Image: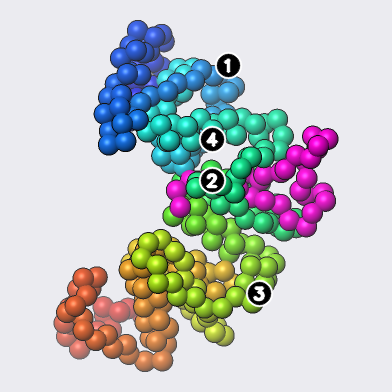
Protein backbone atom coordinates (compact mmCIF):
# COMPACT_ATOMS: atom_id res chain seq x y z
CA UNK A 1 0.00 0.00 0.00
CA UNK A 2 2.74 2.48 0.91
CA UNK A 3 4.79 1.48 -2.14
CA UNK A 4 1.90 2.10 -4.52
CA UNK A 5 1.09 5.46 -2.90
CA UNK A 6 4.71 6.58 -3.31
CA UNK A 7 4.68 5.30 -6.89
CA UNK A 8 1.53 7.32 -7.60
CA UNK A 9 3.24 10.48 -6.36
CA UNK A 10 6.41 9.76 -8.38
CA UNK A 11 4.36 9.16 -11.55
CA UNK A 12 2.71 12.55 -11.08
CA UNK A 13 6.12 14.25 -11.09
CA UNK A 14 7.84 11.92 -13.59
CA UNK A 15 5.33 10.66 -16.13
CA UNK A 16 6.23 7.26 -17.59
CA UNK A 17 8.31 6.09 -14.62
CA UNK A 18 5.82 3.29 -13.88
CA UNK A 19 6.50 1.63 -17.24
CA UNK A 20 10.13 1.11 -16.23
CA UNK A 21 9.28 -0.66 -12.97
CA UNK A 22 5.94 -2.26 -13.86
CA UNK A 23 7.15 -5.88 -13.91
CA UNK A 24 8.84 -5.53 -10.51
CA UNK A 25 5.73 -3.92 -9.01
CA UNK A 26 3.26 -6.42 -10.45
CA UNK A 27 5.31 -9.45 -9.38
CA UNK A 28 6.16 -8.16 -5.90
CA UNK A 29 5.32 -10.74 -3.18
CA UNK A 30 3.29 -12.83 -5.61
CA UNK A 31 1.71 -15.86 -3.87
CA UNK A 32 3.54 -15.01 -0.59
CA UNK A 33 0.47 -15.06 1.64
CA UNK A 34 -1.39 -17.78 3.59
CA UNK A 35 -3.87 -18.30 0.73
CA UNK A 36 -1.12 -18.56 -1.87
CA UNK A 37 -3.06 -16.21 -4.16
CA UNK A 38 -1.61 -12.77 -3.38
CA UNK A 39 -0.82 -10.68 -6.42
CA UNK A 40 -1.23 -7.38 -8.24
CA UNK A 41 -3.49 -6.81 -11.26
CA UNK A 42 -3.76 -3.65 -13.31
CA UNK A 43 -6.17 -1.98 -15.71
CA UNK A 44 -5.71 1.10 -17.88
CA UNK A 45 -8.13 4.01 -17.96
CA UNK A 46 -9.16 5.42 -21.36
CA UNK A 47 -8.81 9.10 -20.52
CA UNK A 48 -8.55 11.72 -17.79
CA UNK A 49 -12.32 11.76 -17.44
CA UNK A 50 -12.41 8.11 -16.39
CA UNK A 51 -9.66 8.44 -13.81
CA UNK A 52 -11.26 11.57 -12.39
CA UNK A 53 -14.58 9.72 -12.00
CA UNK A 54 -12.90 6.67 -10.46
CA UNK A 55 -10.96 8.87 -8.04
CA UNK A 56 -13.94 10.90 -6.84
CA UNK A 57 -14.00 14.04 -4.72
CA UNK A 58 -10.84 14.11 -2.59
CA UNK A 59 -10.27 10.43 -3.46
CA UNK A 60 -13.54 9.29 -1.88
CA UNK A 61 -14.51 6.89 -4.68
CA UNK A 62 -11.10 5.20 -4.68
CA UNK A 63 -11.27 4.75 -0.91
CA UNK A 64 -14.72 3.17 -0.98
CA UNK A 65 -13.62 0.74 -3.71
CA UNK A 66 -10.60 -0.17 -1.62
CA UNK A 67 -12.44 -0.62 1.68
CA UNK A 68 -15.41 -2.49 0.23
CA UNK A 69 -13.36 -4.92 -1.87
CA UNK A 70 -10.57 -5.49 0.67
CA UNK A 71 -7.97 -4.96 -2.06
CA UNK A 72 -5.36 -2.21 -2.15
CA UNK A 73 -6.56 0.15 -4.91
CA UNK A 74 -4.19 2.83 -6.18
CA UNK A 75 -4.05 4.94 -9.33
CA UNK A 76 -0.65 5.44 -10.97
CA UNK A 77 -0.94 7.75 -13.93
CA UNK A 78 -3.58 6.21 -16.22
CA UNK A 79 -3.29 2.78 -14.57
CA UNK A 80 -5.26 1.36 -11.64
CA UNK A 81 -3.37 -1.22 -9.57
CA UNK A 82 -5.23 -3.73 -7.39
CA UNK A 83 -3.23 -5.75 -4.86
CA UNK A 84 -4.53 -8.50 -2.60
CA UNK A 85 -5.68 -12.09 -2.64
CA UNK A 86 -7.32 -13.39 -5.80
CA UNK A 87 -10.77 -13.00 -4.23
CA UNK A 88 -10.07 -9.39 -3.19
CA UNK A 89 -8.70 -8.45 -6.61
CA UNK A 90 -11.69 -10.00 -8.39
CA UNK A 91 -14.06 -8.06 -6.17
CA UNK A 92 -12.14 -4.85 -6.83
CA UNK A 93 -12.37 -5.31 -10.60
CA UNK A 94 -16.08 -6.14 -10.43
CA UNK A 95 -16.82 -3.10 -8.28
CA UNK A 96 -14.86 -0.88 -10.68
CA UNK A 97 -16.86 -2.30 -13.62
CA UNK A 98 -20.19 -1.61 -11.89
CA UNK A 99 -19.03 1.88 -11.00
CA UNK A 100 -18.62 2.76 -14.69
CA UNK A 101 -21.77 0.90 -15.75
CA UNK A 102 -23.76 3.36 -13.63
CA UNK A 103 -22.77 6.09 -16.10
CA UNK A 104 -24.61 4.24 -18.87
CA UNK A 105 -27.79 3.33 -16.97
CA UNK A 106 -29.22 0.96 -14.36
CA UNK A 107 -26.92 -1.83 -13.14
CA UNK A 108 -28.08 -5.35 -12.35
CA UNK A 109 -25.79 -7.93 -10.71
CA UNK A 110 -26.59 -11.45 -11.85
CA UNK A 111 -26.57 -14.02 -9.05
CA UNK A 112 -26.56 -11.44 -6.26
CA UNK A 113 -28.52 -13.77 -4.00
CA UNK A 114 -25.63 -16.27 -4.03
CA UNK A 115 -22.91 -13.72 -3.26
CA UNK A 116 -21.35 -13.47 0.21
CA UNK A 117 -20.44 -9.78 -0.23
CA UNK A 118 -23.91 -8.44 -1.04
CA UNK A 119 -26.92 -7.22 0.94
CA UNK A 120 -30.04 -5.94 -0.84
CA UNK A 121 -32.59 -3.62 0.80
CA UNK A 122 -36.01 -2.82 -0.66
CA UNK A 123 -36.54 0.96 -0.68
CA UNK A 124 -40.00 2.56 -1.13
CA UNK A 125 -40.16 4.63 -4.31
CA UNK A 126 -41.14 7.78 -2.43
CA UNK A 127 -38.03 7.49 -0.20
CA UNK A 128 -35.42 6.95 -2.93
CA UNK A 129 -34.57 10.65 -3.28
CA UNK A 130 -34.33 11.05 0.49
CA UNK A 131 -31.90 8.13 0.87
CA UNK A 132 -29.85 9.03 -2.20
CA UNK A 133 -29.52 12.73 -1.48
CA UNK A 134 -28.52 15.51 -3.84
CA UNK A 135 -25.98 14.06 -6.31
CA UNK A 136 -25.68 10.91 -4.12
CA UNK A 137 -24.54 12.97 -1.12
CA UNK A 138 -26.44 10.89 1.46
CA UNK A 139 -25.37 7.54 0.02
CA UNK A 140 -21.82 8.86 -0.22
CA UNK A 141 -21.73 9.72 3.48
CA UNK A 142 -22.84 6.16 4.38
CA UNK A 143 -20.30 4.63 1.99
CA UNK A 144 -17.55 6.75 3.54
CA UNK A 145 -18.61 5.91 7.09
CA UNK A 146 -18.84 2.14 6.62
CA UNK A 147 -16.55 1.42 3.68
CA UNK A 148 -19.19 0.00 1.37
CA UNK A 149 -20.24 0.35 -2.27
CA UNK A 150 -23.94 1.15 -2.71
CA UNK A 151 -26.14 1.59 -5.76
CA UNK A 152 -29.72 1.02 -6.87
CA UNK A 153 -30.05 -2.18 -8.86
CA UNK A 154 -32.64 -2.55 -11.61
CA UNK A 155 -33.34 -5.88 -13.26
CA UNK A 156 -33.50 -5.84 -17.05
CA UNK A 157 -36.44 -7.53 -18.76
CA UNK A 158 -36.38 -9.26 -22.16
CA UNK A 159 -36.76 -5.95 -23.97
CA UNK A 160 -33.76 -4.47 -22.22
CA UNK A 161 -35.77 -1.94 -20.24
CA UNK A 162 -35.21 -1.56 -16.52
CA UNK A 163 -37.78 -2.67 -14.01
CA UNK A 164 -38.08 -0.89 -10.69
CA UNK A 165 -39.19 2.63 -9.98
CA UNK A 166 -41.90 2.74 -12.61
CA UNK A 167 -43.63 -0.60 -12.19
CA UNK A 168 -43.02 -1.57 -8.60
CA UNK A 169 -43.55 0.09 -5.25
CA UNK A 170 -39.95 -0.48 -4.17
CA UNK A 171 -36.49 -0.55 -5.70
CA UNK A 172 -33.51 -2.62 -4.67
CA UNK A 173 -30.54 -0.93 -3.07
CA UNK A 174 -27.45 -3.15 -3.31
CA UNK A 175 -24.75 -2.85 -0.63
CA UNK A 176 -21.35 -4.46 -1.23
CA UNK A 177 -18.52 -4.98 1.24
CA UNK A 178 -17.61 -6.98 4.38
CA UNK A 179 -20.48 -8.34 6.49
CA UNK A 180 -20.15 -5.88 9.38
CA UNK A 181 -19.85 -2.86 7.09
CA UNK A 182 -22.85 -4.00 5.03
CA UNK A 183 -24.98 -4.42 8.16
CA UNK A 184 -23.99 -0.97 9.42
CA UNK A 185 -24.94 0.60 6.10
CA UNK A 186 -28.17 -1.39 5.91
CA UNK A 187 -29.30 -0.33 9.39
CA UNK A 188 -28.46 3.32 8.65
CA UNK A 189 -30.62 3.14 5.52
CA UNK A 190 -33.43 1.41 7.43
CA UNK A 191 -33.32 4.12 10.11
CA UNK A 192 -33.71 6.84 7.50
CA UNK A 193 -36.55 5.05 5.70
CA UNK A 194 -38.39 4.40 8.96
CA UNK A 195 -38.31 8.13 9.68
CA UNK A 196 -39.97 8.91 6.34
CA UNK A 197 -42.26 5.86 6.26
CA UNK A 198 -43.00 4.69 9.83
CA UNK A 199 -43.58 0.95 10.16
CA UNK A 200 -42.06 0.01 6.79
CA UNK A 201 -39.35 -2.13 8.41
CA UNK A 202 -40.56 -2.47 12.00
CA UNK A 203 -44.19 -3.44 11.61
CA UNK A 204 -44.78 -6.70 13.53
CA UNK A 205 -41.14 -6.90 14.69
CA UNK A 206 -40.45 -8.43 18.10
CA UNK A 207 -37.43 -8.44 20.39
CA UNK A 208 -34.72 -10.89 19.44
CA UNK A 209 -31.69 -12.27 21.28
CA UNK A 210 -29.41 -14.49 19.21
CA UNK A 211 -27.28 -17.25 20.74
CA UNK A 212 -24.90 -17.25 17.80
CA UNK A 213 -21.28 -16.68 18.84
CA UNK A 214 -20.30 -15.02 15.57
CA UNK A 215 -21.74 -11.93 13.95
CA UNK A 216 -25.50 -11.50 14.26
CA UNK A 217 -28.08 -8.86 15.17
CA UNK A 218 -30.29 -8.58 18.27
CA UNK A 219 -33.36 -6.38 18.64
CA UNK A 220 -34.57 -4.38 21.64
CA UNK A 221 -37.96 -2.60 21.67
CA UNK A 222 -38.08 0.87 23.22
CA UNK A 223 -41.15 2.12 25.08
CA UNK A 224 -42.73 5.58 25.10
CA UNK A 225 -40.02 8.27 25.03
CA UNK A 226 -37.09 5.93 25.72
CA UNK A 227 -35.80 6.22 22.14
CA UNK A 228 -35.26 9.99 22.36
CA UNK A 229 -33.38 9.56 25.65
CA UNK A 230 -31.25 6.74 24.24
CA UNK A 231 -30.53 8.79 21.12
CA UNK A 232 -29.35 11.97 22.82
CA UNK A 233 -28.58 15.33 21.26
CA UNK A 234 -27.55 14.84 17.61
CA UNK A 235 -27.33 11.11 18.32
CA UNK A 236 -24.48 11.56 20.82
CA UNK A 237 -25.81 9.02 23.34
CA UNK A 238 -26.31 6.34 20.69
CA UNK A 239 -22.80 6.94 19.39
CA UNK A 240 -21.19 6.63 22.84
CA UNK A 241 -23.08 3.37 23.52
CA UNK A 242 -21.93 2.03 20.15
CA UNK A 243 -18.32 3.02 20.74
CA UNK A 244 -18.20 1.67 24.30
CA UNK A 245 -19.81 -1.67 23.49
CA UNK A 246 -18.02 -2.29 20.19
CA UNK A 247 -21.35 -3.30 18.66
CA UNK A 248 -23.24 -1.67 15.80
CA UNK A 249 -26.12 0.19 17.44
CA UNK A 250 -28.82 1.74 15.30
CA UNK A 251 -32.36 2.83 16.06
CA UNK A 252 -35.00 2.02 13.45
CA UNK A 253 -38.18 3.63 14.70
CA UNK A 254 -38.73 2.29 18.22
CA UNK A 255 -36.47 -0.73 17.65
CA UNK A 256 -32.80 -0.82 18.65
CA UNK A 257 -30.75 -3.09 16.40
CA UNK A 258 -27.55 -4.34 18.05
CA UNK A 259 -25.09 -6.01 15.66
CA UNK A 260 -21.81 -7.75 16.41
CA UNK A 261 -20.33 -10.83 18.03
CA UNK A 262 -22.26 -12.41 20.92
CA UNK A 263 -20.01 -10.62 23.41
CA UNK A 264 -20.47 -7.23 21.69
CA UNK A 265 -24.24 -7.69 21.46
CA UNK A 266 -24.47 -8.62 25.14
CA UNK A 267 -22.50 -5.51 26.12
CA UNK A 268 -24.62 -3.34 23.86
CA UNK A 269 -27.85 -4.64 25.38
CA UNK A 270 -26.48 -4.20 28.93
CA UNK A 271 -25.29 -0.65 28.25
CA UNK A 272 -28.65 0.38 26.78
CA UNK A 273 -30.50 -1.11 29.76
CA UNK A 274 -28.17 0.60 32.25
CA UNK A 275 -28.71 3.90 30.47
CA UNK A 276 -32.48 3.56 30.74
CA UNK A 277 -32.23 2.52 34.40
CA UNK A 278 -30.50 5.83 35.19
CA UNK A 279 -33.78 7.60 34.47
CA UNK A 280 -35.37 5.85 37.44
CA UNK A 281 -32.46 6.06 39.88
CA UNK A 282 -28.96 4.75 40.55
CA UNK A 283 -27.65 1.68 38.75
CA UNK A 284 -26.05 -1.24 40.59
CA UNK A 285 -23.70 -3.59 38.70
CA UNK A 286 -22.80 -6.83 40.46
CA UNK A 287 -19.63 -8.91 40.03
CA UNK A 288 -17.67 -5.99 38.60
CA UNK A 289 -14.41 -7.83 39.32
CA UNK A 290 -15.33 -10.45 36.71
CA UNK A 291 -15.67 -7.91 33.90
CA UNK A 292 -12.82 -6.87 31.60
CA UNK A 293 -14.66 -3.86 30.14
CA UNK A 294 -14.78 -1.64 33.23
CA UNK A 295 -12.49 0.44 35.44
CA UNK A 296 -13.83 1.35 38.88
CA UNK A 297 -12.99 4.69 40.49
CA UNK A 298 -13.85 6.03 43.94
CA UNK A 299 -14.95 9.67 43.80
CA UNK A 300 -15.33 11.88 46.92
CA UNK A 301 -19.00 12.71 47.49
CA UNK A 302 -18.16 16.43 47.39
CA UNK A 303 -16.83 16.06 43.83
CA UNK A 304 -19.71 14.04 42.39
CA UNK A 305 -21.57 17.03 40.94
CA UNK A 306 -18.37 18.51 39.49
CA UNK A 307 -17.51 15.22 37.72
CA UNK A 308 -20.99 14.57 36.32
CA UNK A 309 -21.58 18.18 35.29
CA UNK A 310 -24.86 20.01 34.87
**Secondary structure of the residue carrying numbered label 2:** loop
Discs 1/4, front: 4
x and y percentages locating residue 180 in the rendered image: 44, 55
Which class describes the residues within 10 Å of circle 3: few (<14), some (14-19), or many (20+)? few
According to the picture, the residue beneath numbered tag 2 turns out to be: 115
x and y percentages locating residue 259 in the rendered image: 44, 64
Quarter holding residue 203: bottom right
According to the picture, the residue beneath numbered tag 3 turns out to be: 203
Q: Nearer the viewer, residue 6 or 160?
A: 160
Apparent side of residue 238 relative to residue 115 in the rendered image (left or right): left
3D distance between C-alphas at marks 2 and 1: 30 Å
Q: What stretch is highlighted in magenta?
A: 151-179
**Secondary structure of the residue carrying numbered label 4:** helix
The C terminus: image quadrant: bottom left
According to the picture, the residue beneath numbered tag 4 turns out to be: 95
Q: Which of marks 3 and 4 is nearer the N terminus?
A: 4
Which residue appears farthest toward the bottom when viewing the image? Answer: 281
Amino acid sequence: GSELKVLSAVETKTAGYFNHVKEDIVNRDRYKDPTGTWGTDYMTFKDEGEISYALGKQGGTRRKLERSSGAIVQYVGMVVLLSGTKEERERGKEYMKWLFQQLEGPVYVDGWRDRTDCTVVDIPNDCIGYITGNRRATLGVMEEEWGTLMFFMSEMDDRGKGKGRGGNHTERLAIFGPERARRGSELKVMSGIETKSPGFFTRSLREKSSRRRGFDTDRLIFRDDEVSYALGKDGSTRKKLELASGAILQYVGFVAFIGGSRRERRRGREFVNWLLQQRRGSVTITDISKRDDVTEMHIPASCKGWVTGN
